[in-house]
Image: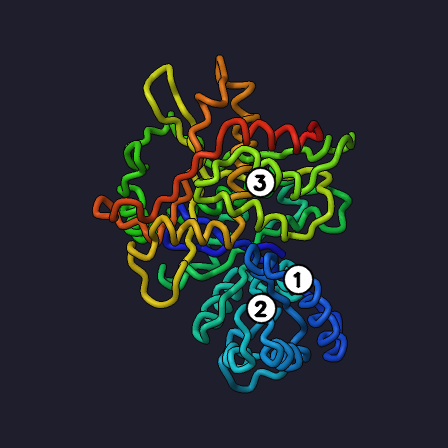
Amino acid sequence: MMGAAITGGGATARKPLMAGNWKMNKHHLEAIALVQKLDFSLRREDHDAVEVVVLPPFVDLRSVQTLVDGDKMRIGYGAQDLSVHDSGAHTGEVSGGMLAKLGCTYVVVGHSERRQHHGETDQVVNDKVKAALRHGLVPILCVGEGLGVRSLNGQVDHTVDQVGAALAGVPAEQARGIVIAYEPVWAIGTGEVATPQDAQEVCGEVRLSLSELYPGELADALLPVMQTPLGFGTLAEVVPADRLSELDFELPLAGGDDVRGEVTLQGVADLLRRHLPADDVLAPYADLLDTVEAPPLRGYLSGSIDAVLRVGRQGQPAYVVVDYKTNRIARGDLTALHFTRAAMAAEMLRAHYPLQALLYCVALHRYLRWRQPGYDPGRHLGGVQYLFVRGMVGPQTPPGCGVFDWHPPAALVVAVSQLLAGRS
């Protein structure tokens, strides 16, 4: 189960949530063993990149709580369902208050199996969302269409309607924390396969529907980000024709299905040392990358760039990769002054964002090779900007704060592209 948090701003990056729904499997002793094994297998880098959550049966929750708290694990946990009621004569039901006392952070609401086998209507799902929020739990709202709806090409309307019904009467300040998990129910046990494009089609429309559900909150959150200077203007000044949003990509590694050569993170580290100047603020990343233990990379690397902006004069464009980040950087109340260039660089290194930025540049490089007349990497690659939106407060943003710009040499981008292709 994958999820993405709803936030008040429409242009915010989401830390991936990987939540494992155990369904009706594992008694409490097996649960302890499984969580211990999971914790042992995860590295610090894994937790930095992804929020890991387990969703065991009700009877396992106390054992999981004791283990996670006692060993101070960085694993979250939650429940698979809850009652619409807070207490009373409801035999077999478990309330949100009970789950909160067990330290649960999340609770699944509206899973397809609950809708199909237990007759949960959109109204029941809405009531459960509100019950979870009353007790400080984060609902993982499950939505998605069955094969019948899919065959009629009704997946978008069906799923958007589910979201709207589930959030009816939920104020924006509460909706910001909800997780929406899209599950292509039609591809479960049918022999059909859901592609990333299938998911992106529905998820994109769901995001759009949220902006329509909460337009005022979206505008208020976006305005400072849109008006913060970027060095070539502001986001608000970029016309639609010069903005490419959500550039999806899929990069074959070492030839993809036709394997040739070997791609390793150490190879990327070597290229960083070869091409980055010693005084580059992200030059230390090469040594950091060398500490990551990983097997040779195989298969395909897929992802999505938040935005690509075309800047510069007519006829001499450069293309800038833009990624939105909501990292807090420091504890407590934050101001734009917490997001200095040095602080953002440290966060870039800690979260392994330089590798992400390089891969985005490679994806853009390959995209432009076939679409930009007279393409020249040195002229057309305009670097990357990581927008730490918590540090972007509009025109009054202190110089150097909130916007981290980096210009990896074009030769480095080309070299990494060749490495990923299996060519030295």
- Residue 202 as seen in the image, left or right of residue 322: right
Whole-Å distance between the Cαs marked 1 and 3? 22 Å
**Amino acid tagged 1:** Leu
Q: For the residue labelled by badge 2, is the local secondary structure a helix, a strand or a loop?
A: loop
- Callout 3 environment at 10 Å: few (<14), some (14 to 19), or many (20+)? some
Residue most extreme to the left: 396
Badge 3 marks a residue whose secondary structure is: strand
What residue do we see at 40% from left, 45% from top?
11
Query: Looking at the figure, which quarter contains the N terminus?
Result: bottom right
The image shows residue 285, relative to residue 249, as above or below, that is below
Q: Residue at x 47, y 22 (%)?
A: 378
Q: Closer to us: mark 3 or mark 2?
A: 2
Residue highlighted by disc 2: 74
- Which amino acid, mark 2? Arg
Q: Is residue 248 above or below residue 20?
A: above
- Residue 332 image-quadrant placement: bottom left
Tag 1 near tag 2, CB within 8 Å: yes
Total marks in image? 3
Label at residue 272: none
Badge 3 is on which residue?
303
Category of crowding for the residue at label 1, using alpha-carbon neighbours closer than 10 angstroms: few (below 14), some (14–19), many (at least 20): few
SS for dot 1:
loop
The residue that label 1 is drawn on is: 42
Query: Mark 3 is on which residue type?
Result: Gly
Residue 400 picture quarter: top left
Dividing the image into 4 quarters, which one contains the C terminus?
Answer: top right
Of residues 158 and 274, which is closer to you in this image?
274
